Amino acid sequence: MQSREKCLNILQNSNQIVIFKFFIVERGKDKRQKRTVAIKVEPEHHGELDNAPNDPRRLVIEQQVLLTLRKKPNIPMIYASGKTEKNCPYIVMQILGKNLTTLRKERTEPKFTLSTAFRIGQQGSRKSMEQYNSSNN
């Protein structure tokens, strides 16, 4: 993993992909490698979690899972990680394709149909089970 200073020198923020309660995902550009990346940042928490200003556990756990599953199909590569100037954890990773929010916004209806939501869950579950079974053999 690269240090925060090196990471900030080679990354250029493009635009926000999606905002969730526990993290923000932005599209960025790795100027050195000339590739588009996803930058996932945990926002500042103000005493909401265990009376700590930032609770980095969520992103740390996600990073550990991604590192454990690296080089498996459908798992993004982690290019860098660290903390921002405000001590917010971040991960810079590969973009695999369109996210569900983008796909949903491309529809004329604002929501996925029930059958589409079911298929998304089914495909994700099936892929997860395939990965689990192949790693335990």
Image (tube, rainbow, N blue to C red):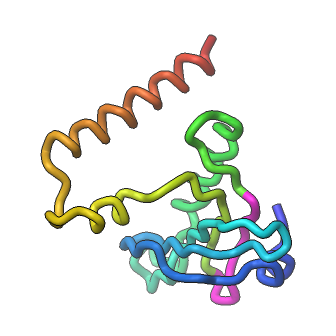
Most distant residue in the bottom direction? 85
- Which of 83 and 121 lies nearest the eye of the viewer? 121
Measured from the top left, where is residue 126 in percent x and y?
39, 26
Query: Which quarter of the image is occupied by the N terminus?
Result: bottom right
State the residue at coordinates (36%, 33%): 123
Residue 86 among those drawn in magenta: yes
> Which residue is at the front of the view, 128 or 109?
109
Is 67 left, or right, of 33 in this rendering?
left
Q: How many marks?
A: 0
Q: Looking at the rendering, which quadrant does residue 102 occupy?
A: bottom left
Q: Residue furthest top?
A: 137
Q: Position of residue 68 (x, y in %)?
A: 67, 39
The magenta stretch spans which residues?
Answer: 79-87
Quadrant location of the C terminus in the rendered image = top right
Q: Is residue 73 magenta?
A: no
Q: Residue at x 83, y 83 (%)?
A: 9
Q: Position of residue 118 (x, y in %)?
A: 22, 38
Q: Is residue 137 above or below residue 70?
A: above
Residue located 57% across and 61% down the image: 59
The answer to whether residue 31 is above or below residue 129 is below
The answer to whether residue 85 is above or below residue 136 is below
Q: Decide if residue 24 is on the left or right side of residue 123.
A: right
Q: Quadrant of residue 2?
A: bottom right
Residue 85, percent across and down?
70, 88
Q: Is residue 101 left or right of residue 3?
A: left
User: What residue appears at the point 77 percent right and 82 percent down from the top-left corner?
Assistant: 8
Is residue 89 toward the left or the right of residue 82 in the image? Answer: left
